Image (cartoon, rainbow, N blue to C red):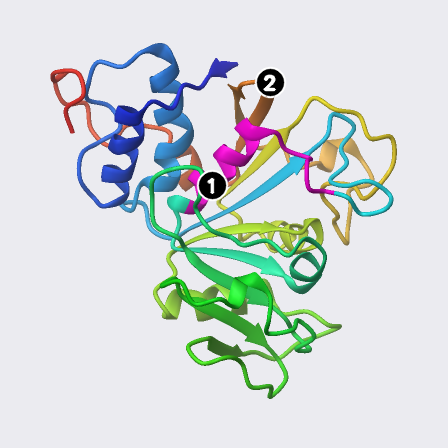
Amino acid sequence: MQTVEVTARVWDRILALRQGRGCACCGRWSAGERAALSLYAPLARRDLGPVTVAQIGQSLDGRIATVSGDARDISGADGLAHLHRMRALVDGVLIGARTALHDRPRLTVRMCKGANPARILLDPRGRVPDDLEIFREDGARRIVVQAVDRPRPSGVEVIHLPEGDGWFAPGDILAALQMRGIGSLLVEGGGITIGRFLEAGLLTRLQVAISPLLIGAGPASLTLRSPVARLADAIRPETRSYGLGPEVVFDCALSPEAVAAWAPIHAAPVVAAGGI
């Protein structure tokens, strides 16, 4: 397992990579900074085409909340900072209606340098009220995907898609978002939404962040409609693990493109420390 150290200079390099400047290989970096480049550069790169990444924060026993639904402290400070960094590296962050109603997330970048991504809500039947934080005006794009003809606040982009059994086809969602310039997407929740994208084979990578606590009961971190009956049929992605303080992140590559993204863009000569 690699221990991640996100210093100001390595984060500046990662943000530069997101803007198409610099690379993830040149420079004199500590072991922790190189681990940070390995973890975040695949999300920052824009040379490998569209990326769809999902992130799950869970306890040691695989729970994302208590029986009563309390999920606020499932991730500690290191896990939350990691999630905010992921948001800063994508074009848009997507959640389902249940997550919006229960967790009321802001979906902003507050714990690191970077721009807020577009906030995208899947609300097939238009049940999410317009006064939630995700709809506030702060300069970031706000997008709602819905099947009903329901007006939304001024400035909110509405995408109409057909639904089936209360849900949208993940491929239709991605196609509609990519047509609107969302090339890199973070599917942040919840577990059912992430499971739909995973089963459709549309996730480039999956990150599972495990916090050192035991809950004992509550909703599971990932829910699939068609779980495997035999371990021989289980998804076995190529995986790297990273330590962020007391938390561990498993970065799972779900496509050849995701594996390729771990490799440096080029093998240029080493430059002075801190160069971009």
Amino acid, disc 2 = Pro
- Mark 2, Cα crowd under 10 Å, few <14 / some 14-19 / many 20+, is few
Q: Quadrant of residue 33?
A: top left
**Camera-side residue: 235 or 155?**
155
**Camera-side residue: 153 or 17?**
153
Amino acid, disc 1 = His
Residue found at x 33% / y 22%: 7
User: Please, what secondary structure does the residue beneath circle 2 have?
Assistant: loop
Q: Is 254 situated left or right of 110 in this image?
A: right
* Magenta highlight range: 71-87
User: Please, what secondary structure does the residue beneath circle 1 have?
Assistant: helix
Q: Mark 1 — residue?
A: 84
Q: Is residue 36 above or below residue 160?
A: above
- Mark 1, Cα crowd under 10 Å, few <14 / some 14-19 / many 20+, is many
Residue found at x 72% / y 43%: 222
**In x, y percent, where is residue 78?**
53, 27
Q: Is residue 116 magenta?
A: no
**Camera-side residue: 148 or 197?**
148
| Mark number displayed over residue 246 | 2
Residue found at x 34% / y 39%: 113
Cα–Cα span, label 1 and label 2: 17 Å
**In x, y percent, where is residue 251?**
52, 31
